[in-house]
Amino acid sequence: MADPTTLRDLALEVARAVAPELRRLAGRTPVERTKSSATDLVTSADRWSELEIVSRLLDARPDDGILGEEQTSLPGTSGVRWIIDPIDATTNFVYGLAGYSIFIGAEGDGEPTAGVIVDPALGHEFAAARGAGSTCNGEPIRVSDQVELSHALVATGFGYHPDRRRRQAAGLVEVIPRIRDIRRGGGAAMDLANVAAGRVDAFYERGLNPWDIAAGTVLVREAGGTVGDLDGNPTDGDFVLAAPPGLRDALAELLRSVEADRA
């Protein structure tokens, strides 16, 4: 099994290689098709980015497995699997808004091991490896020390289907009066990176996928935070709550009371 820091460094090298082209294409690339709904966008840049990332990873480690959002799926034989979102927050990318990112995570024997989230627009490079901490542009980062629910700045996102959005919005009406405020950045990857850096206190969302959370899970945990479902169990994305340990239980109780995990 590869050392987690070796996997982290390779992921960062690959993301850095792809970032300049995505920065150039942002706001200039039309929508090519949609996936799960009319608001779930795909561009040619998504496909280019995934192919480029996969090619570079396999050049370096040809026996690894791959799971990519744009349908790349390779089993591998090494025990390492890369989980890739070539452009998280594609809507932001299409509109030329900051907040889109390149997401490369690595699992070792099914456990999150390393992760990189790179923001091409702002030049922020978040990286983490199990046992080695989390950084932004090489500087150590930590989750916030917030413990008061009423003072918590919380990020969230919404699903692609109209009915789910309606239910999520109804729950949010009950959440907002109990916290400091809500932030909606448009991409789960950057939301998790911002939790790891203490830029927001917590993040929750229902209906995510492994490629939305794998890298961010390592970042938050290595920055001293927790990531899981409302019960604190590991999650594959169906419901995700990321928070500092001192805030997690109170926020989980609030979210459970509004049935956020069922919205």
Image: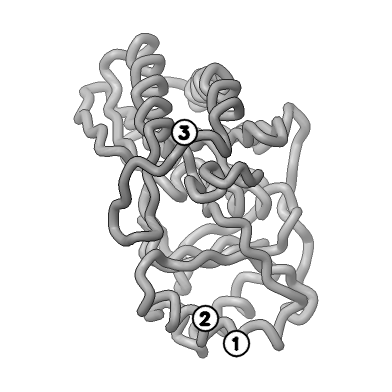
Which disc number belongs to residue 190?
Answer: none
Q: In this view of the protein, can residue 91 be seen by the observer?
A: yes
Across and down, in percent, residue 246 comes to 70, 69
Q: Secondary structure at mark 1?
A: helix
* Residue 216 image offset from top left, x and y in percent: 53, 46
Mark sitting earlier along the chain (3/2): 3
- In the image: residue 226, left or right of residue 153: left
Amino acid type, label 1: Val
Q: Which mark is residue 173?
A: 1
- Give me the residue at 34% from left, 60% from top: 38
The answer to which of 33 and 136 lies nearer the viewer is: 33
Occupied quadrant, residue 16 = top right
Q: Residue 132: x percent and y percent?
A: 62, 32
Circle nearer the N terminus (1, 3): 3
What is the x, y in percent for residue 236?
Answer: 36, 56
Around disc 3, counting alpha carbons within 10 Å, would you say few (fewer than 14), some (14 to 19), or many (20 or more)? Answer: many
Crowding near the residue tagged with mark 1, few <14, some 14–19, many ≥20 C-alpha atoms within 10 Å = few
CB contact under 8 Å: marks 1 and 2: yes
Horizontally, residue 145 falls left or right of residue 64, namely right
Looking at this rendering, what residue extends furthest in the top direction?
59
Residue shown at the point (33%, 15%) measured from the top left: 58
**Residue under label 2:** 169
Residue at image coords 27%, 28%:
65
- Secondary structure type for disc 2: helix
Distance from disc 1 to disc 3, alpha carbons, whole Å, reads 34 Å
According to the picture, the residue beneath numbered tag 3 turns out to be 104
**Which image quarter holds the C terminus?**
bottom left
- Label 3 near label 1: C-beta < 8 Å? no
